């Protein structure tokens, strides 16, 4: 079982991405019903968003789909 990456630091940016866990609002809302493989993809995308955020490069969620 893959646990939620929620850090209880919930605040959405202008792209509807949480600046605590780096999940998009759709990923947060759908987490409980996702398959394990889908959750792994989300976690991978979260890591990419976090790296991009710390480098101030931003990201385009559409490129990840």
Image (spheres, rainbow, N blue to C red):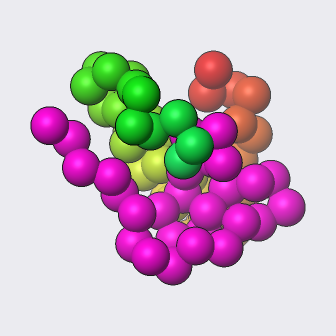
Furthest-bottom residue in this view: 9
Q: Residue at x 33, y 52 (%)?
A: 4
Q: Quadrant of residue 42?
A: top left
Q: Residue at x 54, y 47 (%)?
A: 28
Is residue 11 visible in the rendered image? The answer is yes
- Where is 4 relative to 44, above or below? below
**On the rendered structure, is 52 left or right of 5?**
right
- Where is 52 relative to 1, above or below? below
Front position in the image: 10 or 15: 10
Front position in the image: 54 or 34: 34
Furthest-front residue in this view: 33
- Where is 53 relative to 28, above or below? below
- Whether the magenta-drawn stretch holds residue 24 is answered as yes
Front position in the image: 47 or 25: 25
Instruction: Tell me the quadrant of the picture where the C terminus can be found.
Output: top right
Q: Quadrant of residue 35?
A: top left
Q: Position of residue 2 (x, y in %)?
A: 21, 41
**On the rendered structure, is 46 left or right of 61?**
left
Q: Position of residue 59 (x, y in %)?
A: 71, 47
**On the rendered structure, is 35 left or right of 59?**
left
The chief SS type of the magenta part is loop
Instruction: Tell me the quadrant of the picture where the N terminus can be found.
Output: top left
- Whether the magenta-drawn stretch holds residue 25 is answered as yes
Q: Position of residue 27 (x, y in %)?
A: 56, 39
- Magenta range is 1-27
Is residue 48 visible in the rendered image? The answer is no
- Where is 9 relative to 63, above or below? below
Furthest-left residue in this view: 1
């Amino acid at each position: 079982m893959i646990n939620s990456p929620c850090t209880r630091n919930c605040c959405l940016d202008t792209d509807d991405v949480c600046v605590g866990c780096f999940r998009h609002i759709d990923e947060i809302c759908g987490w409980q019903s996702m398959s394990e493989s889908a959750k792994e993809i989300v976690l991978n995308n979260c890591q990419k968003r976090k790296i991009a955020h710390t480098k101030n490069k931003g990201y385009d969620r559409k490129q990840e789909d």
